[in-house]
């Protein structure tokens, strides 16, 4: 039976907007992750320095999807304005502060360019949030994109090992990405997202299991110890929190109190036995030792100490967003002079934020994360499954940034996820408040 004439155009428009939303999410990931040149000499730190400054190809890629996001947001401007008003206020404050840092930045043009990228992520997050699509649109777009990248990376690693395998790091796979740790980071997300699909059974089980195994296999082949650890942690959190016996209006508070009590008991036990509080090396030593790593994550502690020298020079406001790790002749030159090589980042997201944005910027970032947890606690009251997977993945981001620098690093994968997740959760809460969630959440692939 054909739909009425007045509903057919609306249905067609809704399908188009939904497909465009998925394309925007997928393309933002692809443009930020994939090494389009597939050149061995253009992977690693050198490529990262070039990306930080911004190439013409990068500007064309992101400029095009940002324009499409503006158009889509304008088509649903009532919802866009509503979602913006109820978005994470500290996330908006972080973006504004990044822009403001150009006033004292050592590289003001770079600060402006990278801040524009953050605004673009906000636009995509607002434009693709419900009710443009169902509540899982963003997560599934990311999941399928990650799986596609994992498959292509496996093919390149097997067929073109000179390109897809980093033999300097023990034969670790990097596939079509810049670095093996990036491949490990995205596939860890893929494992958790496919695990959710396996348990919810909204798609054929065989497809879900196949996707899960592909991501898990590529994760292992990337030999990223940090990604493997946080994947285990994220899966454990997701499996525990989704169980119905933990349901209730005060679940998050109860879990938080139990965690704090256990932590305090552990600290008290260590203090009684050793007469001192545990250090980071004490905590990470057994874990990293089992993975054949040093407790400072393979010498990253030396980089952290050198970056903190820069922090001491501008502890409150920072050196300027994106103004430090810019390669030869930049503010980080002294680190190369001392190490005889130039790192691409500080390999510690919170130290890098402190260095570039100072205590003010780090404080706003922590506040944005805490606000996100607050919104997830509200979401859990009526959509436990959705809240749980967002919670597990954001914990993964927080933990992994103790050894990697992706949080607030413009279009780094984990920063993209944080922006999209925060805006998506805010939008779902808006729909629930208006009583429009059931109709808007319907969809599927």
Image (cartoon, grey):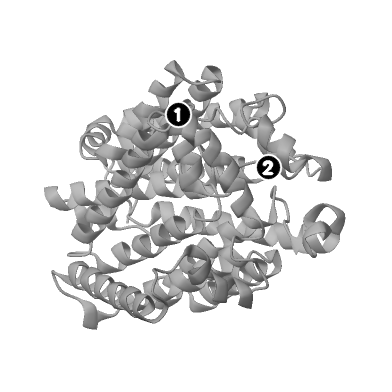
**Label at residue 343:** 2
Q: CA distance from mark 2 to mark 1?
A: 21 Å
Tell me what residue is drawn at x 24 percent, y 37 percent.
79
How packed is label 2: few (under 14 Cα within 10 Å), some, or many (20 or more)?
A: many
**Label at residue 46:** none
Q: Where residue 423 sits: x, y (%)?
A: 32, 44
Tell me what residue is drawn at x 66 percent, y 26 percent.
55
Q: Quadrant of the C terminus?
A: bottom left
Whether residue 201 is visible: no
Verify CB contact (< 8 Å) between mark 2 and mark 1: no
In the image shown, does 367 or 196 lie closer to the viewer?
A: 367
Up-down relation of residue 321 to residue 126 (above or below): above
Tell me what residue is drawn at x 55 percent, y 27 percent.
323
Tell me what residue is drawn at x 67 percent, y 32 percent.
334
Residue at numbered disc 1: 314
Q: Quadrant of the N terminus?
A: bottom left
Whether residue 390 is visible: yes
Give the quadrant of residue 139. Answer: bottom left
Q: Where residue 192 sits: x, y (%)?
A: 47, 68
Q: Where residue 184 sits: x, y (%)?
A: 61, 61
């Amino acid at each position: 039976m054909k739909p009425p004439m007045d509903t057919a155009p609306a249905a067609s428009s809704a399908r188009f907007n939904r497909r465009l939303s998925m394309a925007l999410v997928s393309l933002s990931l692809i443009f930020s992750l994939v090494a389009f040149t597939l050149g061995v000499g253009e992977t690693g730190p050198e490529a990262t320095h070039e990306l930080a400054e911004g190439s013409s190809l990068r500007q064309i890629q992101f400029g095009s999807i940002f324009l499409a996001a503006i158009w889509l947001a304008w088509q649903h401007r009532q919802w866009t304005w509503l979602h913006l008003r109820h978005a994470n206020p500290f996330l908006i404050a972080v973006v504004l502060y990044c822009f403001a840092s150009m006033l004292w930045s050592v590289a003001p043009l770079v600060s402006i360019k990278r801040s524009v990228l953050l605004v673009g992520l906000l636009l995509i997050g607002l434009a693709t949030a419900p009710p443009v699509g169902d509540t899982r649109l963003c997560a599934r777009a990311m999941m399928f994109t990650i799986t596609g990248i994992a498959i292509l990376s496996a093919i390149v690693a097997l067929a073109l090992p000179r390109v897809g395998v980093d033999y300097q790091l023990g034969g670790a796979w990097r596939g079509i990405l810049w670095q093996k740790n990036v491949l490990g980071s995205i596939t860890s997300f893929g494992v958790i997202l496919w695990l959710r699909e396996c348990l919810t059974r909204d798609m054929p089980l065989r497809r879900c299991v196949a996707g899960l195994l592909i991501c898990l296999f590529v994760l292992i082949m990337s030999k990223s110890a940090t990604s493997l650890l946080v994947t285990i942690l994220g899966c454990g959190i997701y499996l525990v929190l989704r169980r119905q016996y933990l349901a209730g209006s005060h679940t998050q508070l109860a879990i938080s109190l139990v965690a704090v009590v256990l932590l305090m008991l552990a600290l008290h036990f260590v203090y009684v036995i050793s007469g001192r509080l545990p250090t980071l090396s004490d905590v990470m030593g057994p874990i990293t030792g089992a993975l054949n790593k040093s407790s400072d994550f393979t010498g990253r502690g030396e980089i952290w100490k050198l970056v903190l020298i820069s922090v001491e020079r501008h502890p409150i406001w920072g050196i300027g967003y994106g103004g430090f790790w810019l390669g030869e002749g930049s503010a980080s030159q002294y680190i190369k002079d001392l190490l005889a090589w130039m790192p691409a980042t500080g390999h510690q997201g919170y130290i890098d934020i402190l260095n570039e944005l100072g205590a003010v910027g780090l404080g706003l970032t922590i506040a944005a994360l805490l606000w996100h947890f607050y919104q997830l606690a509200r979401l859990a009251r009526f959509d436990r499954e959705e809240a749980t997977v967002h919670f597990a993945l954001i914990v993964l981001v927080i933990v992994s940034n103790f050894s990697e620098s992706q949080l607030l690093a413009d279009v780094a994968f984990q920063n993209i996820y944080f922006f999209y997740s925060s805006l998506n959760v805010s939008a779902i809460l808006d729909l629930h408040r208006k009583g429009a969630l059931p109709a808007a959440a319907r969809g599927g692939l």
